[in-house]
Amino acid sequence: MLTTVYCIHFPLFMSNQQTASTGKLSQILNLLKQALKGEDLDFTQGSIRKAVLLLAIPMMLEMAMESVFALVDLYFVGHLHNSSHAIQTVGLTESVLTIIYSLAIGMSMAATAVVARRIGEKNPEAAAKAGVQAIIVAVAVNVVISILGVIYASDILLLMGASAETAVQGTPFARIMMGGSVIIVLLFLINGIFRGAGNAAIAMKSLWIANIANIILCPVLINGFGPIPAFGLTGAAIATTIGRGIGVCYQVYHLVSGKSLLKLHLSYFKPHFEQIKALLKIATPGIFQFIIASCSWIFLAQLVATTGGDHGSAGYQTALRLMMFFMLPAWGMSNAAATLVGQNLGAKSLDRAEQSVMKTAKYIVIYMIAVMAFTFIGGYYFISFFTNDKLVQEVALHALQIMSLGYIFYGIGMVLISTFNGAGDTWTPTWVNLFGFWLFQIPLAFLLAKHFEMGPTGVFIAIPVAETGIAIAGYILFKKGKWKTIKV
């Protein structure tokens, strides 16, 4: 009798299980479709898990696309004649451009914080006005920086530790990249505005469009095609600048079309000094925050170049770009925390803001564990794909294996810093970066590389050690809760 009952109910149990699995898969696919489509949603209520995923998925893909820019350039220039000079030029130029990225990111985080707070308060008109004022300030400042970069491109490469031959070959590349940096600023900033409004899909799609253009143009302009001459290394700069420019055009279209929650009007472009002052109050420490970090990376790049030579520098830059390729999606995920914190603080939902951070941190740890394993297993194959120079490959693999040990702490640190920035508390991570990078990482790297004569290896070790300390400090400050009281 028991056997008969079991035989009757077993198919029914299997059928229910299959139905449940199908339903779960359908829910995941619908969530993915909704995240990629991009809609104006209210993230101040409903499932926190769903809110995190709806923002994190397009933000991760957006940052993955940003890292593809660097890897596409690295692949094509890594196969040029005397590739060590080309790789070094690209790496050192990008290190300097991180200062400009700092301006873009600083203004972007200010725009995200203010726009998210106004959206949480259900005031999209004020959000749109704040976004426009951020664009005005960023463009005005970056025009001056771009002009200086074009004039002093060669001197900057030499100052960074490049050899005279590398500086000569790389100056045209550096001039184009620095001259077109206003496009970089706009790409970051406008995406920050869309993220603050909760429409991360538009930000993601702008990077997709920019990358597709870059992938098509890079081989054409570097190697030549038909009547188009081969520009070599310079072609990579032209392709990247044009690709990003196309992405900015896509962003602007959505800003002025009036189809999104943010609707711009011509009157918004009149400078509003009170709004500019409020944005700069948030952006200034945010800019310093990333300049502190960027200058630290510049110092480390210079230290590796002077102790490891051209091949050591090229190997480090290769490893760094691969590491950033895996870390940028995590940064995208951490941006979800910034948006959720800003909007929920605007809606006076303090507990929901904190829960959003913890949920995001959980997902980012899972991602970073997977990435760490992936890096150790496939590190050599990734590196050999981007450069065929054996000496560069050897240094790059050594650097990647050491630096990737801190992946989990990198991820946690990014979520916590995004939390402070999303709340408008940009001073806290600025002080954390100052102490973590300049009073700990740089002295440690210098001591290991020079005093203990470990060379580039000392620099590689200092990076995960310092990032671990920064993550621990960030968590302690997060639990104190000062970020919940910030007004923007």
Image: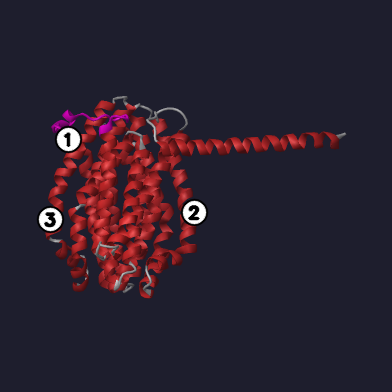
Which residue is at 46% across, 37% downward?
33
Span of residues in magenta: 256-278
Which residue is at 14% across, 48% downward?
143
Which residue is at 23% across, 42% downward?
107
On the image, which quarter does residue 68 sit in? Answer: bottom left
Q: Nearer the viewer, mark 3 or mark 2?
A: 3
Name the residue carrying label 3: 148
Q: Residues within 10 Å of mark 1 (few under 14, many from 20)?
A: some
On the image, which quarter does residue 483 sit in? Answer: top left
- Residue 314 spot, x, y in % from top left: 31, 68
Q: Of the numbered discs in the image, which one, if any, rests on residue 370?
A: 2
Q: How far apart in space, not on screen, are marks 1 and 2 (Cα)?
A: 42 Å
**Which numbered disc, 3 or 2, marks the residue that appears first in the sequence?**
3
Q: Name the quarter where the C terminus is drawn.
A: top left
Which residue is at 34% across, 39% downward?
202
Amino acid identity at mark 2: Ala
Q: Of the numbered discs in the image, which one, if any, rests on residue 276?
A: 1
- Residue 95 spot, x, y in % from top left: 25, 59
